[in-house]
Amino acid sequence: MDFPSVSLVVPCFNESNRIDLMYEGLYEFSQVWKGDYEFVIIDDGSKDGTYRKLKTHSRYFEFLANNKINVIRQRNRGKGGALRLGVLCSEKDFVLTLDADMATRPTELISWLHSRGEFVYDEILIASRELASSKVSDSIVRHIIGKIFNFVIKQSVGLNISDTQCGFKLYKAEVGILLYKELETFGWAHDVEILARAKNYEFEIIEMPIKWTSVAGSKIRIIRDGWKMFWEVIRIRKIIERTFNQDNEE
């Protein structure tokens, strides 16, 4: 089986307490992935020393010596904004986005490769915690909130996807760059815009089983961020309608 080259894009915001965990997951990946790879890490304007810790960690110097890591700092723009920069800076054939908390270990990508046989251009593979074959450790409350949010997405945007919000997603580089270059939603609901655009471009979106474990220290606050995400979804519907109606008129 051929292992493709892949850029792992990781957004970080105030993650100083989890940098060790992140580097542990990336190192584990580096030991088993048989293709070319790079780590693109975006510090999204952290104020807790995240950038300093990213650049002084022993694993950073190991990866840097082998030209496998690029750590970039930007002013705070939100998770979507951090991912946009990371994807646009990636240089390998495929792009894997994932979270700094390593709730899903990057080595899960190997399971996906074995399952699919190969990764192809027009398929976007996204992790789904709702599949029966996924192994998920999460609170009942978060699980219920996730179901409600995805119901809202189905009704508002028309995405028939059971889990839009898991950060573990794989794109062909050209596809990821196309979608993220056009991204207008930089908050938590950016995934919804990305997938809605992918649907309108007629890329095939395939939900994949995953191992996912909740990690303490989540940046999401259910009530505060839940309302923000709700209004972002309403705005995304308008963005998609405006963008693709214009394309059809042209």
Image (spheres, rainbow, N blue to C red):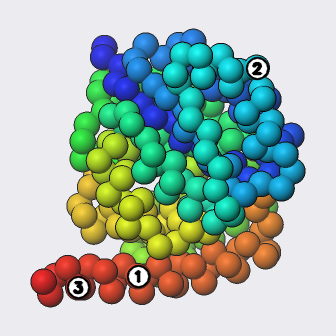
Which picture quadrant has residue 211? top right
Q: Which residue is mark 2?
A: 58
Residue 160 horizontal/vertical position (percent): 40, 65
Circle 1: residue type? Ile
Residue visible at 52% across and 22% down in the picture: 67
Q: Which residue is mark 3?
A: 246
Circle 3: residue type? Gln
Q: Are marks 2 and 3 in contact (CB under 8 Å)?
A: no
In this rendering, position of residue 235 left or right of residue 43: left
Please tell me how many numbered marks the rendered image carries: 3
In this rendering, position of residue 51 left or right of residue 249: right
Q: Earlier in the sequence, mark 2 or mark 3?
A: 2
Quadrant including the N terminus: top left
Circle 2: residue type? Ser
Residue 52 horizontal/vertical position (percent): 79, 39
Residue visible at 79% across and 75% down in the picture: 223
SS at mark 1 in the image: helix
The answer to whether residue 102 is above or below residue 199 is above
Viewer-side label of 1, 2: 2
Residue visible at 68% across and 20% down in the picture: 61
Residue 247 horizontal/vertical position (percent): 20, 79
Which picture quadrant has residue 117? top left
Q: CA distance from mark 2 to mark 3?
A: 50 Å
Quadrant including the C terminus: bottom left
For the residue pair 10 and 143, the one nearer the viewer reads as 10
Q: CA distance from mark 1 to mark 3?
A: 11 Å
Q: Which residue is most to the left?
A: 250
Q: Which residue is mark 1?
A: 239
